[in-house]
């Protein structure tokens, strides 16, 4: 019997394994689940797992391997933006289909990729709104790892804060290398910056591994969430499971999903996950939900299209809706990004988040930021007649699109 | 049983031909050319259904392997023959790659996502207003190539000149090279550098007007890579077999003695280092269009260490060993990551351990052992022992 | 007006066809031995971590001489050679090669190219090269990088190597790796390398250590035959050997010259007997 | 005391020692001679356990030791002074001497005074790095070091290479003293006939990896010398 | 201004001994279940007003996030998890056990950041009158931020009730601050500034700064005095800033030293290019994790147990590696790079397979958390301080082992001339194994310390291997003192550059300087000397 092949392109070794392995397991769990439901189009699903080993060129190579050698029908993969950028030309050349489940800096929309993680307007902007309105924050530290996601997000936030009337000297920006582990000076600077008598908050786009030492240093230098709250965009339940969260209670994170959110679907998902992975202590997180939504949407789209043919599925995907784990319904928009709700959670001492704020309804993901001069006129629309990822609403043309 | 053994011996002897002056050259060159030409033809001429069809994936993979082989050879020339253990050769490779990447970036022109004809995408969305000066001229292929050679060459020259003049040797030199590539990695990670930060340069469209996604371009790139590898191999072989090569080995074994014979050993080392850096740069230049991305990760010290490992697996001090080692390890990596994604590191790690323990001189040593008839097989073990393993000083031995 | 004609005059001078511009004149400096002295060492001091290895040492060696240098272990003989060949920097003093070359201003490689060759106390040869190639690398000639790349062995060079091989008795080992030679064989090879280089001044540190009596004799003959055309300085502890070759003997003690003279003079010097030879010598 | 039977040894493919037989009596002072490359050093290394023998037997006080490692042989009382001295270059003279102490059978924890009596120069140099000493000083250190383990057999490989004449004599005297007064068995490799004659009581001539002649030193005649030692 | 909204001071005397079950309290409490966060804030305010000091246990339960209510009845209670993870109810105020509750039946009274700070302030006010000295001090400091008249009155009440000299000074400082703000008399205000001179408390500085910047301030003399006071404060801050940087540098140096010190043995002394060194550190860190899993109720002692345990674990793995692999590579030092690189891959994957690829949670014991406040702008974090001391202790211990035992001498002899060492009766195999084990064990011990600073994950080792090699080489291979000095100088250099250049550039500059330094001293900071080293 023929199968439908699902490629899994997540690093299982190297620096990113820490985050991506979970997503590999999530896809395997979804494939299992789908097969138990009878597969798709009467065929079984078969997962093809490869390890791109946190090596960016290897991502491209493995994507090519999946598409040409394994002939997979869809790929779930990537975490870092650079890996996605590396894979992008390959999926476009070979007309593959990829689901990308991680929050990212936006500024991209490809016909062959569906972005189920948050774009900056679904994470960063609401978080800043919350801090400004509810916590009356007036002074801002934008701390990030030095790479494209934080750089872009901070650019957007800077522009956004300035339009909201924050003075330049009330914004401090600090970048650190990947895996930075000595935060003494920076935390001390933050402390000083925050002692000017105005309520101060840190907006953290610090990546993965650097977070643990960062929070440890915060706690030890006595920066409590009540004095200077930190809102993070890359710290979820999984990251917290590696930290002693006692001293971090009250710091914040903005996501489209928290494990702690009460809903039947979520409870089922969490249980299913714990069972699948065989560990009661394992947690779920936002990229997992994004994978979950992406996978289910794809399955729905394949049923709808009646084929796994990429062009048909791509068109069928647009407008597909699927219930979020947190209640409400996610919808795939014309720009290949999702509409999802946004939550702000506070860290609890059990390593979970307590939602303290949420958007009224869903927020539609922007492929192009309204706050960057280069892209405020761009939109992505993969339906006729525009059918392009970077349509300029001023010049009424797709910039630089190779046909 | 005995037929198996004779067959094996014949095979080994056949491999051993690689190392014989003259004939070895033609064998390796021949094999490389025949294989790549056959692959190219199979890709372009046969229909995809044919069992003999070679996919573009394989072509690209092969191209990448050959670039790595060239890099490994570059390392072997200075390490195997001159005893300079560079733990930072990835730097030259990456610099070459960035040179080529800049050219390819400029070729995108206004086909980038923002449609800006002058600025690469990453500059547009980080709000750069104009092209930095060091990007000028990089839209010309010849100029880009020149820069991509000149920068690594110059860096190698300055670095080598400083280091060898002050007689930095052994691990001290190795760690210096490592610091060099590490510093470059951190620098290239910085977005302010204007090389795309962590994301590096990507989304290339075409090279010299040929579409990079076209099969024919990929095949052409493979063939060019093969050709360059063959040329580099022949040149290097000529060098190591000349008197220059003998001086270099002499420098490796007893630099002081060579100096007392009147050889300015630091000059030999500098020029060899520059030569090796240039080969690495060429490898990097060929690598980038084939894998489609260049980013600061290539500067990572661990990458450079891996190259050293390829050379050691293949057999240090034999040019063909470096090539075979690079091909083998990378092939193993490709296979293992697909066959056992969760456990491939066990396999690769074990491979390294086993090779070291059981094949003291790498695969090349294995060939030797089965084919040794000449004196070289009986290398002086005594010499190695008597330096007492004070490797702290004698790592270059 | 005047100045103009001066300038033209100068220009004409500069452009003269029968001269080469000074900076284009090859700076191949050969040693000037017009005073018949090839090595002047004056007031040399070398110390290591406060230990005075050479102590205000003065030594003059004539061109074509065969000089024996003896002295107690640790007297500074090897250190002296280190200074001459540029391996060790001296704290003060001067070292001239002939009238015109200041050795202290050159590094090891330059000094070797100037024509000073050396055999080490502990034999050092290129272990990964064959005996033949060891000799080839030692041949006199250009030692530049580019020249080495294009160098081929000429017929006469090949003959020279064969000749040396015969002298040192390693004809049969010519393709053997030097690393596999025994201690004594390495000694010979290193002497051979010295011969192949045909230096003007040979510094030979303990050449007969580990050699049999007959080999010692052969070495003595060899060194004697070299004297005249070359200048040879030999360090050796084997008194019979020294006696068989020596014309002038210099005795070093604690970093300076203790005595100098013919073998007989030195042998009967009380000081020398006390610190070096021992009573029954 | 020591008896070697049919010893064979190879470096890689080349055989160096061929069916070598050797007999050393307790308390003797035997001088092994032969041309460069005859295999003298190789033989001593096999005896010391630093080179594995391909086959053959080595008996020490009647017990086979060919299988035991060098350190065990040192503990049994074999002291070794290698050709080229092999001082630990970065250890001080004192440390060089201390290394051997644990191998003593009497458990002494201090460097015996006897050594400084034999080689006073070592006392002056106690805190210098071994590698900085001049050749002759190193040679004395090497012998002193071998004596620290309180050996019953002392193996010396060309101990006079590069040593000033009065010290050569001194070493000769020391060896004789050790042999005659302390009853040490001495095995000496030596090229210089004079020294060999003066110190040795027995001789063994080696050629091409085998012992070709063995006798009392008094019987070493010109004929033998011409045949086996001349080039 | 600080976030804390202007709070109404409890009008009822805080000293009144009202019953907590007073009807007013009860009715406020009734409104808590299901209240919005904003509403909860109001309710807390009312509770403080009507309940006073008696509300403290309630506030503390709330602050800890343990306040729940039963969904059906709306009854408030405290939930404590017992060791089996069951939720046990405890009645408020009385502390009676109410038995186990199902998580579905109860709901948490939500608290957020802002509420927590409100609660903390309320507790501080209570503490000021009822707490011990430290609590009083903290309470006064907290109030400096928000010196309204009522707070001030409270402070005065406290002072009259009798407080320690230190707290009293602080209260006087508060007085001065209020004086400066409210008085119109120049002399009074100058006196106030005098009292504030040289104080490092943030509110003092901010008030002076505001005064200096303010356009409405007319009194030139006061402004000048304030400026002077401010300059003096800045001067002191500058000084403490330097001190802080020095400590940061030493602390970073101690981390580098710890990471490198094992390598100084395996690589520096034995000459094994040990690429698996990082993984030995990693094993030590994982050992800490396992130990904490084994003794969850004695986290305070876990590190003390972990140090020897990590030494044994990493040390034994080291011995295994030596016996299994390195031993076969004698005389081929370079090949050890290849083999240990392979081993490092295997070890990384092994922990990934055994412990999952995620980071493991290592708890920081109480005694290592927080910081030692020397003054308001200079404090030293305990974990860094202990690690600094620990690094020095490990170093001293190692030096002692190598100097005092025969191992040190034997290792050096073996590394300089293996054959000769054998011939001298040294059991070289034993020495090799012990040395490699020692180096690895020390790396493991370093892992225990690093587990307190950074991720305990499969990549832990990789992040330290490059730095470790640099430190060892910079210091001079084979020289332990060099490793010590090398580690600290790299750390301090880095930290002094960082404020000016940022973390990334500082790192780059240090690397470039390292390269140039090796030009000048090709054998590192403390080179091996003598003829043999040439
Ligand atoms: N690099 C050094 N560091 C310290 N001391 C040194 C160094 N080099 C030489 N010495 C000392 O200088 C003195 C002279 O040594 P040198 O080798 O020149 O003696 P020599 O005359 O050649 O002796 P021999 O006949 O034994 O070879 C010795 O005492 C030696 O210890
Ligand atoms: N490590 C080695 N590998 C190969 N051959 C070797 C090695 N060491 C020694 N030989 C060879 O073994 C033979 C015997 O060497 P050995 O050192 O025992 O000679 P020897 O009698 O001590 O000579 P000498 O008097 O010169 O010290 C020599 O021909 C030498 O070339
Ligand atoms: N897309 C990110 N988080 O790199
Ligand atoms: Mg000497
Ligand atoms: Mg010998």
Image: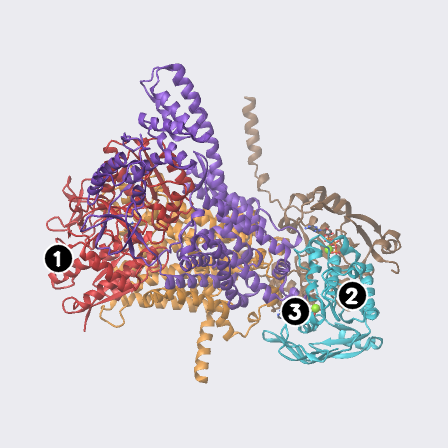
Chain colours: A red, B orange, C brown, D cyan, E purple
Q: Is mark 3 within 8 Å of ligand 2?
A: no
Measured from the top left, where is residue A362 in percent x and y? Answer: 16, 47
Measured from the top left, where is residue C61 in percent x and y? Answer: 77, 49
**In this orientation, which residue lies closer to the viewer: B277 or D110?**
D110
From the image, tell me which residue sits under label 2: C217
State which chain disc 3 sits on.
D
Measured from the top left, where is residue B152 in percent x and y? Answer: 43, 49
From the image, tell me which residue sits under label 3: D71
Mark 1: few/some/many CA within 10 Å (<14, 14-19, 20+):
some
CB contact under 8 Å: marks 2 and 3: no
Q: Which mark is residue A316?
A: 1
The residues bearing labels 1 and 3 have C-alpha atoms spaced at a distance of 79 Å
Q: For the N terminus of chain A, which image quadrant?
A: bottom left
Give the foreground label among 1 and 2: 1
Circle 1 — which element? helix
Circle 2 — which element? helix
State which chain disc 1 sits on.
A
Give the foreground label among 1 and 3: 3
The residues bearing labels 1 and 2 have C-alpha atoms spaced at a distance of 100 Å
Q: Which mark is residue D7?
A: none
**In this orientation, which residue lies closer to the viewer: A169 or A370?**
A169
State which chain disc 2 sits on.
C
Query: Is there any visible trace of residue B158 in the rendered image?
Result: no
Mark 3: few/some/many CA within 10 Å (<14, 14-19, 20+):
many
Measured from the top left, where is residue E19 in percent x and y? Answer: 28, 39
Circle 3 — which element? helix
């Amino acid at each position: 019997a023929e199968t439908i092949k699902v490629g899994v392109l997540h690093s299982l070794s190297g620096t990113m394994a820490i985050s991506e392995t979970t997503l590999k397991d999530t896809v395997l769990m979804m494939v299992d689940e789908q097969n138990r439901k009878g597969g798709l189009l009467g065929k079984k699903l078969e997962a093809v797992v490869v390890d791109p080993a946190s090596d960016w060129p290897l991502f491209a190579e493995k994507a090519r391997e999946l598409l040409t050698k394994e002939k997979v029908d869809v790929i779930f993969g990537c975490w870092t933006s650079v890996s996605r950028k590396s894979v992008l030309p390959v999926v476009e050349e070979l007309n593959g289909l990829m689901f990308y489940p991680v929050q990212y800096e936006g500024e991209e929309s490809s016909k062959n990729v569906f972005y189920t993680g948050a774009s900056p307007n679904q994470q960063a902007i609401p978080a800043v709104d919350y801090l400004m309105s509810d916590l009356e924050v007036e002074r801002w530290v934008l701390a990030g790892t030095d790479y494209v996601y934080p750089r872009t997000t901070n650019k957007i936030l800077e522009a956004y804060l300035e339009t909201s009337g924050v003075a330049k000297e009330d914004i401090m920006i600090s970048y650190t290398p990947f895996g930075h582990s000595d935060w003494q000076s920076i935390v001390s600077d933050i402390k000083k910056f925050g002692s000017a008598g105005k309520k101060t908050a840190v907006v953290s786009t610090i990546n993965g591994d650097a977070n643990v030492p960062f929070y440890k240093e915060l706690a030890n230098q006595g920066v409590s969430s009540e004095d200077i709250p930190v809102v993070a965009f890359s710290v979820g339940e999984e990251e917290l499971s590696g930290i002693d969260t006692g001293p971090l209670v009250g710091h914040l994170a903005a996501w489209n999903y928290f494990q702690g959110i009460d809903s039947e679907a979520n409870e089922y998902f969490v249980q299913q996950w714990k069972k699948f992975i065989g560990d009661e202590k394992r947690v779920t997180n936002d990229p997992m939900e994004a994978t979950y939504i992406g996978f289910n949407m794809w399955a729905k789209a394949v049923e709808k299209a009646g084929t796994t043919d990429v062009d048909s599925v791509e068109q069928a995907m647009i407008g597909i809706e699927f219930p979020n784990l947190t209640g409400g319904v996610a919808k795939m928009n014309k720009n290949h990004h999702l509409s999802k709700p946004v939550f702000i959670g506070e860290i609890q001492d059990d390593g979970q988040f307590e939602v303290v704020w949420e958007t009224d309804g869903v927020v539609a993901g922007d492929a192009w930021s309204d706050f960057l001069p280069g892209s405020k006129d761009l939109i992505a629309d993969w339906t006729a007649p525009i059918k392009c990822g970077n349509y300029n609403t001023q010049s009424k043309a797709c910039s630089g699109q190779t046909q | 049983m005995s037929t198996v053994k004779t067959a094996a011996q014949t095979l080994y002897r056949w491999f051993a031909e690689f190392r014989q002056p003259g004939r070895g050259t033609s064998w390796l060159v021949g094999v490389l050319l025949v294989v790549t030409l056959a692959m190219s033809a199979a890709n372009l001429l046969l229909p995809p259904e044919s069992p003999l069809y070679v996919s573009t994936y394989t072509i690209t993979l092969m191209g990448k392997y050959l670039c790595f082989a060239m890099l490994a050879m570059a390392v072997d020339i200075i390490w195997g023959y001159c005893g300079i253990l560079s733990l930072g050769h990835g730097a030259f490779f990456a610099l070459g790659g960035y040179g080529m990447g800049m050219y390819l970036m400029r070729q995108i022109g206004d086909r980038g996502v923002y449609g800006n004809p002058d600025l690469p995408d990453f500059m547009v969305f980080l709000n750069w207003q104009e092209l930095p000066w060091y990007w000028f001229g990089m839209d010309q292929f010849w100029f880009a190539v020149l820069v991509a050679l000149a920068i690594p060459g110059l860096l190698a020259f300055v670095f080598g000149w400083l280091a060898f003049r002050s007689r930095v040797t052994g691990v001290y030199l190795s760690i210096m090279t490592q610091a060099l590539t590490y510093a470059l990695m951190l620098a290239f990670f910085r977005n302010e550098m204007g090389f795309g930060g962590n994301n590096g340069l990507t989304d290339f469209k075409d090279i010299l007007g040929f579409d990079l996604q076209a099969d024919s371009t990929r095949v052409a790139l493979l063939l060019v890579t093969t050709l360059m590898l063959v040329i580099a191999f022949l040149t290097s072989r000529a060098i190591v077999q000349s008197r220059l090569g003998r001086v270099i080995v002499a420098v490796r074994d007893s630099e002081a003695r060579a100096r007392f014979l009147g050889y300015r050993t630091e000059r030999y080392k500098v020029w060899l280092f520059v030569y090796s850096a240039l080969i690495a740069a060429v490898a990097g230049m060929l690598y980038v269009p084939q894998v489609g991305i260049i980013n600061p990760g290539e500067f990572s010290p661990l990458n450079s260490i891996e190259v050293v490992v390829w050379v050691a697996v293949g057999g240090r001090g034999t040019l063909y060993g470096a090539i075979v080692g690079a091909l083998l390890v990378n092939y193993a990596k490709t296979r293992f990551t697909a066959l056992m994604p969760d456990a491939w590191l066990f396999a690769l790690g074990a491979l390294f351990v086993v090779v070291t323990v059981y094949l003291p001189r790498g695969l090349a040593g294995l060939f030797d052992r089965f084919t040794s008839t000449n004196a070289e097989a009986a290398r002086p073990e005594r010499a190695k022992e008597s330096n007492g393993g004070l490797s702290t000083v004698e790592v270059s031995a | 007006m005047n100045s103009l004609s001066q300038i033209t005059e100068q220009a004409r001078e500069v452009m003269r066809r029968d001269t080469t511009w000074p900076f284009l004149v090859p700076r191949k400096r050969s040693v000037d031995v017009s005073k018949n002295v090839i090595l002047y060492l004056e007031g040399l001091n070398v110390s290591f971590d406060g230990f005075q290895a050479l102590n205000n040492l003065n030594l003059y060696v004539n061109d074509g001489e065969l000089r024996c240098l003896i002295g107690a272990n640790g007297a500074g003989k090897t250190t002296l050679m280190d200074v001459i060949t540029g391996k060790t920097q001296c704290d003060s003093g001067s070292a001239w090669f002939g009238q015109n070359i200041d050795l202290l201003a050159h590094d090891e490689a330059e000094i070797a190219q100037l024509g000073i060759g050396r055999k080490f106390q502990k034999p050092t040869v290129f272990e990964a090269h064959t005996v033949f190639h060891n000799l080839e690398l030692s041949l006199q000639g250009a030692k530049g990088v580019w020249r080495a790349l294009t160098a081929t062995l000429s017929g006469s060079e090949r003959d020279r190597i064969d000749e040396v091989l015969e002298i040192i008795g390693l004809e049969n080992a010519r393709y053997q790796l030097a690393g596999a030679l025994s201690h004594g064989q390495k000694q010979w090879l290193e002497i051979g390398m010295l011969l192949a280089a045909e230096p003007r001044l040979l510094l030979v540190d303990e050449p007969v250590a580990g050699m049999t009596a007959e080999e010692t004799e052969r070495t003595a003959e060899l060194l004697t035959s070299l004297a005249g055309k070359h200048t040879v300085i030999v360090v050796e502890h084997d008194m019979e050997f020294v006696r068989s070759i020596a014309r002038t003997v210099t005795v070093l003690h604690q970093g300076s010259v203790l005595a100098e003279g013919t073998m007989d003079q030195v042998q009967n010097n009380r000081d020398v007997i006390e610190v070096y030879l021992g009573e029954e010598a | 005391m020591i008896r070697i039977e049919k010893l064979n040894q190879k470096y890689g493919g080349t055989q160096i020692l061929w069916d070598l037989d050797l007999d050393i009596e307790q308390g003797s002072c035997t001088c092994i001679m032969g041309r460069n490359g005859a295999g003298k050093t190789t033989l001593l290394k096999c005896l010391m356990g630093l080179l594995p023998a391909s086959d053959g037997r080595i008996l020490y006080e009647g017990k086979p030791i060919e299988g035991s490692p060098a350190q065990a042989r040192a503990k049994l009382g074999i002291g070794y002074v290698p050709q080229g001295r092999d001082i630990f270059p970065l250890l001080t003279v004192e440390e060089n001497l201390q290394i051997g102490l644990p191998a003593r059978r009497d458990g002494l924890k201090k460097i015996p005074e006897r050594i400084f009596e034999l080689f006073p120069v070592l006392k002056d140099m106690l805190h210098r790095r071994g590698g900085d000493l001049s050749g002759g000083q190193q040679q004395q250190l090497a012998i002193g070091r071998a004596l620290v383990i309180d050996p019953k057999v002392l193996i010396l490989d060309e101990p006079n290479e590069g040593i000033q004449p009065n010290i050569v004599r001194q070493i000769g005297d020391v060896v004789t003293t050790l042999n005659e007064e302390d009853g040490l068995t001495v095995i000496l490799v030596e090229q210089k006939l004079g020294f060999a004659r003066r110190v040795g009581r027995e001789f063994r001539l080696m050629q091409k990896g085998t012992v070709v002649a063995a006798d009392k030193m008094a019987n070493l005649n010109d004929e033998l010398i011409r045949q086996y030692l001349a080039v | 201004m600080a976030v804390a909204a202007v709070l109404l001071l409890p009008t009822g005397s805080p000293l009144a001994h009202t019953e907590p079950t007073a009807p007013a309290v009860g009715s406020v409490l009734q409104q808590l279940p299901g209240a919005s966060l904003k509403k909860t804030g109001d309710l807390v305010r009312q509770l403080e007003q009507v309940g006073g000091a008696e509300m403290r246990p309630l506030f503390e339960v709330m602050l800890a996030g343990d306040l729940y209510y039963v969904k059906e009845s709306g009854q408030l209670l405290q939930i404590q998890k017992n060791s089996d993870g069951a939720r046990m109810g405890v009645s408020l105020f009385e502390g009676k056990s109410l038995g186990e509750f199902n998580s579905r039946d109860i709901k948490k009274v939500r608290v957020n950041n802002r509420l927590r700070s409100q609660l903390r302030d309320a507790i501080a006010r209570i503490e000021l009158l009822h707490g011990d000295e430290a609590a009083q001090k903290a309470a006064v400091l907290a109030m400096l931020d928000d010196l309204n008249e009522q707070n001030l009155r409270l402070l005065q009440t406290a002072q009259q009730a009798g407080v320690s000299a230190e707290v009293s000074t602080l209260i006087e400082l508060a007085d001065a601050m209020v004086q400066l703000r409210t008085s119109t008399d120049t002399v009074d205000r100058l006196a106030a500034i005098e009292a504030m001179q040289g104080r490092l408390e943030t509110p003092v500085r901010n008030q002076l700064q505001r005064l200096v910047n303010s356009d409405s301030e007319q009194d030139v003399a006061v402004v000048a005095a304030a400026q002077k006071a401010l300059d003096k404060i800045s001067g002191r801050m500058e000084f403490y800033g330097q001190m802080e940087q020095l400590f940061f540098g030493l602390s970073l140096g101690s981390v580098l030293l710890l990471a490198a010190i094992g390598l100084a043995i395996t690589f520096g002394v034995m000459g094994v290019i040990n690429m698996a060194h990082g993984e030995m550190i990693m094993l030590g860190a994982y050992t800490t994790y396992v130990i904490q899993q084994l003794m969850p109720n004695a986290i305070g002692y876990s590190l003390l147990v972990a140090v020897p345990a990590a030494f044994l674990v990493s040390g034994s793995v080291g011995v295994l590696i030596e016996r299994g692999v390195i031993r076969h590579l004698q005389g081929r030092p370079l090949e050890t790079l290849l083999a240990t690189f392979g081993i490092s891959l295997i070890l990384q994957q092994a922990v990934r397979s055994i412990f999952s690829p995620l980071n493991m949670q290592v708890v920081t014991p109480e005694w290592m958390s927080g910081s030692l406040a020397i003054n308001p702008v200079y404090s030293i974090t305990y974990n860094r301080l202990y690690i600094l001391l620990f690094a020095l202790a490990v170093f001293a211990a190692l030096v002692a082992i190598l100097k005092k035992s025969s191992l040190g001498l034997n290792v050096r002899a073996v590394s300089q001339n293996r054959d000769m060492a054998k011939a001298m009766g040294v059991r070289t195999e034993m020495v090799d194994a012990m040395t490699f084990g020692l180096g690895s064990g020390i790396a493991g011990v370093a892992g225990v310390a690093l587990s307190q600073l950074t991720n305990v994950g499969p990549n832990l080792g990789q992040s330290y291997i490059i730095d470790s090699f640099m430190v060892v080489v910079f210091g001079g291979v084979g020289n332990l003192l060099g490793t010590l000095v090398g580690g600290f100088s790299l750390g301090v250099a880095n930290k002094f550059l960082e404020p000016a250049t940022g973390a990334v550039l500082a790192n780059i500059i240090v690397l470039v300087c390292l390269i140039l330094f090796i030009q000048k001293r090709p054998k590192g900071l403390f080179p091996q000397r003598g003829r043999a080293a040439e």
